[in-house]
Image (cartoon, rainbow, N blue to C red):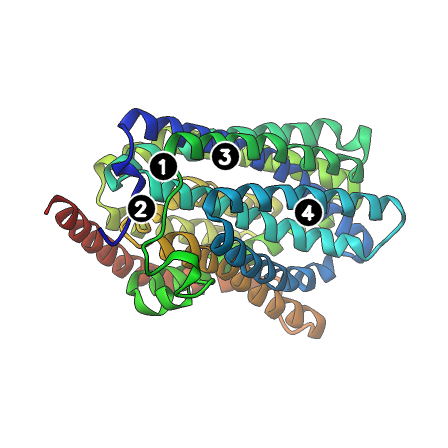
Amino acid sequence: MSRQRVWFWGSAGERVAAAAAIAVSAAFLLCGYEFMRSVSQSLFVQAYGVRRLPWVMAAAPLGTLALVWGYGRVLSAVGARRAMLLTTALTGLAILACHAAIRGGSRGVTAALYVLREAYIVLLVEQVWSFINSTVSTAEGRRLNGPVCGVASLGAIAGGFLVRRYALAVGSNNLLPAAALSLLPTGAAAALAYRWGGEPQPSAAEAGGRRGHLGLGELAAQPTLRRLALLVVLTQVVSTALDLQLNRLVALALPGADERTRWFGGFYAALNLCSALFQFVLAPWLLRRAPLRAIHLGIPLAHLGFCATALAWPLLATAAAAYLCFKVLDYSVFRAAKELLYIPLSYDARYRSKELIDAFGYRFAKGAASLGFGVAAELRAAPPAAYALTALAALAAWVPLAAGLARSGEGQSAARTTSDQS
């Protein structure tokens, strides 16, 4: 065999147990991220103001690329399991260092903290999904991907409620050590998942990063990966536009840093609660019954409706609803359906190209969109409606791309099934 796939190694029960363990790992990871997300955003706005937010968002891809490059080298040297554990431990130390510097009065570290928050979460989350995509078959993924997202979201829900509960009493910066400590059970559960599911192995041609540490070769050779990269760009243009629109309206309504932290904690808790319902109920139901093409097409169509409403009635409520809808589907149905497209692909595609697309590509697209909005804001060249209009334009391009991507993904899944059976 040219590819070693974990599902040939153990029983279905072992694969389900491994998926459950990695889901618990993701739950602790996302719980800590809720502290990082709300705190870093609030502290940066307090230090530099909401008008500078697009600039720090534009810097995030550089930090993400550095982490992805380092991860690729570590993956080549020590393999997938040790790479996951090492990057988790180093992230915890970096968070604690930022906390200490901010306590010492450093204003600039709030920007570094924001960039770290943007980079580490995508790096670690995509490693979680690389393991899942290497451990389950496509049929198993249709059943398990939604619940895996759901278990992970329980941690995010808990983190959001904890932020809301303790932000005013403890203070924003003092919540950062909790984010670092959450990475201890994150790493422990990931180690258990690899023990039960086995460590995915590259082919002889892929071992040691022989085809490159970043996965650029696979990205150039695979049409599915190229379409996924373009899809990520479009989704992040939409996400950034809706995010900045929401931040602008929240800053107008809530001028205090701790008030904003509390509001965002409650908002993200509600967002994660809705996501959990979609992950445990709607995503598994849809993935088992609906064609993948219909799912991928329905997602941007739903966003078009919410964005049009936010454009017609530019209120905090409509902006929050549009962003909440985007993130709920992104965390549930969209994520579960998108990950199925990686399962038939090679080790390098799943562990290297995936990080390049879903970590760096994700942040690069968000950073580029943020930079454009930042320039427009500095020049005062864009009206407030520019956010919703940009999101609508990206959604119009998303629809035909989703149709083509789903067709190519279904074709590759069918080809892989035939190859495995023969």
Amino acid type, callout 1: Asn
Q: Which image quarter: residue 264?
A: top right
Q: Which residue is mark 1?
A: 145
Does the residue at mark 1 contact the one at mark 3 (Cβ under 8 Å)? no
Does the residue at mark 3 contact the one at mark 2 (Cβ under 8 Å)? no
Q: Which residue is mark 2?
A: 340
Does the residue at mark 2 contact the one at mark 4 (Cβ under 8 Å)? no
Amino acid type, callout 3: Ala
Tell which circle, 4 or 1, labels the residue nearer the N-terminal end: 1
Tell which circle, 2 or 4, labels the residue nearer the N-terminal end: 4
- As displayed, is residue 382 above or below residue 186? below
Residue 49: x and y in percent read 78, 56
Does the residue at mark 1 contact the one at mark 2 (Cβ under 8 Å)? yes
What whole-number distance in Å separates the C-alpha atoms at marks 4 and 3? 37 Å
Residue 301 or 223: which is nearer the viewer? 223
Q: Which residue is the extreme one toward the left? A: 422
Amino acid type, callout 4: Val
What whole-number distance in Å separates the C-alpha atoms at marks 1 and 2? 8 Å
How many neighbours does mark 4 have within 10 angstroms: few (below 14), some (14-19), or many (20 or more)? Answer: some
Tell which circle, 1 or 2, labels the residue nearer the N-terminal end: 1
Q: Which image quarter: residue 408?
A: bottom left
Residue 231: x and y in percent read 39, 60
Q: Is residue 272 left or right of residue 59?
A: left
What residue appears at the point 30 percent right and 64 percent down from the top-left corner? 222
Tell which circle, 3 or 2, labels the residue nearer the N-terminal end: 3
Q: Which mark is residue 190?
A: 3
Element on which disc 4 rests: helix
Q: Which image quarter: residue 346?
A: bottom left
Q: Which residue is mark 4?
A: 250
What whole-number distance in Å separates the C-alpha atoms at marks 2 and 4? 36 Å
What residue appears at the point 15 percent right and 50 percent down from the top-left corner? 419
